[in-house]
Image (cartoon, grey):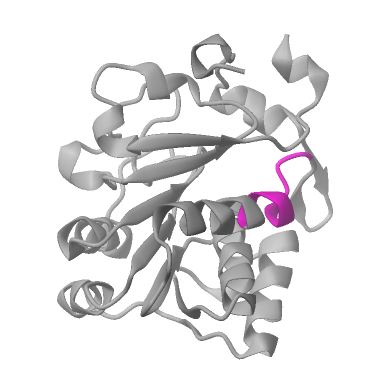
Amino acid sequence: MPERTLKKLSRAKVRVFKIKNRRGYAAVCLNNLTEGRSASEAVARLTHPLRRMGYRLAGKGNNGGDGFVAARHLANAGVRTRVYFFGSPRELKNEPALNRRILLRMGVPVRRPPAGPKLEKELKSCDIIIDALYGTGLTREMRGVGLAAVRAINGSGRPVLSVDVPSGLGADSGRPIGGAGACVRADATVTFGLPKRGFRAPGAGAYTGRVIVKRISLPRALLR
């Protein structure tokens, strides 16, 4: 299907198809397994072969869970992989928590990020960066370590793949939530099911780069 004919998704519609249990929200259709594998496949399309190391920067939500799964697939493919996790393990729930534990059992390093300048220096040594910090759930501008991470990514000079939405970009507006310096500038964005509404906004392409749409069997109600 040509990209111009695809319907666009809003944040609200993404969140409708989630169910709540006693431990928090469990994603039903936008599950980490499918999305994480799609992200790892997109890495192979962007950077082949991977000669050095891939870094994944993961947040504490479902987007971070996608980053954990992508790291697992790439590690299984023999790629040296390191994950920087921006959050506390206690904040993880359901699939993201499970996928973090799997990575640790596999021996893949999952670490707290170093300070901004040191993080940027480390990122410069890798083949590709997967941005899985923030997704469609971000509604306010980033501060502190999140903002420092975005600046380190943009300053690294390495290829960047964002998962679902570049961290800091409004999924509906297509504009940086906290200004141009507070949004990842990706070389490509792998998004799931349908492009996000904001991706067609003027100037959004400077942040999304090439948009790769991966199908994940969305409920038919989302496609109407």
Please state the horizontal and vertical placement of residue 70, each as a whole percent of the image: 58, 63
Please state the horizontal and vertical placement of residue 45, each as a whole percent of the image: 47, 52
Seen from the viewer's position, the closer of residues 66 and 146 is 66
Any magenta on residue 32? yes
Give the number of marks. Answer: 0
Any magenta on residue 218? no
Vertical position of residue 218 compared to residue 89: above or below: above
Tell me which residue sits at (41%, 53%) in the image: 46
Seen from the viewer's position, the closer of residues 121 and 2 is 2
Seen from the viewer's position, the closer of residues 1 and 6 is 1
Q: Left or right: where does residue 69 sit relative to residue 19? A: left
Residue 93 in view (yes/no): no
Please state the horizontal and vertical placement of residue 57, each as a whole percent of the image: 42, 65
Q: Which residues are magenta?
A: 29-36
Q: Left or right: where does residue 14 sit relative to residue 204? A: right
Vertical position of residue 147 compared to residue 219: above or below: below
Seen from the viewer's position, the closer of residues 97 and 222 is 222
Tell me which residue sits at (26%, 17%) in the image: 202
Asked where in the image residue 203 lies, by quadrant, the reply is top left
Dominant secondary structure (helix, strand or loop) of the stretch shown in magenta: helix
Residue 6 in view (yes/no): yes
Vertical position of residue 224 compared to residue 133: above or below: above
Q: Left or right: where does residue 56 sit relative to residue 39? A: left
Vertical position of residue 5 compared to residue 177: above or below: above
User: Considering the image in quadrants, where does the N terminus appear?
Assistant: top right
User: Considering the image in quadrants, where does the C terminus appear?
Assistant: top right
